[in-house]
Amino acid sequence: KVIVAETLDALATFYDEHPGFRSRTCWQELIEGGDDAMFEYTALARIREPDLVGVCTHKIRQYPPAYGLMSYGRSELAPQLADYAARIVRHVDWRGPASIEFKYRAKDGRFYFIETNPRLPWFNGLFRAAGVDLALLMYHDLAGLAEPPSSQRQRDGVYWVSVAQDIGSYWRRRGTDSW
């Protein structure tokens, strides 16, 4: 999933050793920071409503560490991420779920776009617990039903954990200074 090339020579060597990856890879800048610098804004661009509804989560740990899925995190609103996500979704005229990942770089105090996925993430149960049931809203939108009587404002500080994945994260980090 992730190959870090420190130099252009290292990149060239990678392609020499793995020619099947030529023209089939995507490269991006590696933003320094730990797992706790990862944020995800999961939005729903509804068919019948112009406004985006979403939930912002802060990854605290991932499995595998550094480039994996959230194993432990919480709901935590970062208002600028809602704005960034809305711009991305509107720019491509997207309808449906969009899970948009960002990384915060402390050095310059900015969030950097990492990737987007056209689906709800595996930790989407956190959204309902945090007050925004994106799956139910999506169902109602697609079925043409009236919006369910629920809050669309997230509550911060709701935690989510995958015990098995978080234990895996611990074992991979054991003996390092990144725990």
Image (spheres, rainbow, N blue to C red):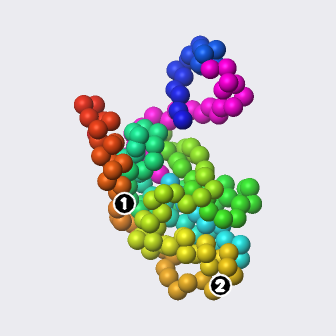
Above or below residue 29? Residue 119 is below
Element class at badge 1: strand
Left or right: 51 as drawn, with respect to 111: right
**Disc 1: which residue:** 160
Could you tell me residue 105's position as x and y percent? 46, 40
Residue type beneath disc 1: Trp
* Furthest-left residue in this view: 175
Q: Quadrant of the C terminus?
A: top left
Residue type beneath disc 2: Leu
Determine if residue 82 is in view.
no
Magenta stretch: includes residue 129 = no
Mark 2 or mark 1: name the one nearer the start of the chain: 2
Write down the quadrant of residue 14 in the picture.
top right
Determine if residue 141 is in view.
yes
Q: Quadrant of the N terminus?
A: top right
Write down the quadrant of residue 120 in the picture.
bottom right
Left or right: 23 as drawn, with respect to 126: right
Could you tell me residue 39's position as x and y percent? 47, 51
Q: Kindly indicate whether the residue at mark 1 contacts the one at mark 2 (C-beta within 8 angstroms).
A: no
Left or right: 17 as drawn, with respect to 128: right
Task: Residue at 36%, 60% (x, y): give it.
Answer: 160
Q: Nearer the viewer, residue 40 or 143?
A: 143
> In 3D space, how far apart are the residues under numbered discs 2 and 1 (Cα atoms)?
29 Å
Task: Residue at 50%, 82% (x, y): give it.
Answer: 150
Could you tell me residue 70's position as x and y percent? 42, 50
Structural crowding at the residue carrying mark 2, measured as other residues with C-alpha within 10 Å and reported as few (<14), some (14–19) or many (≥20) = few
Element class at badge 2: loop
Task: Residue at 74%, 55% (x, y): give it.
Answer: 92
**Disc 2: which residue:** 145
Read off the magenta span: 18-39
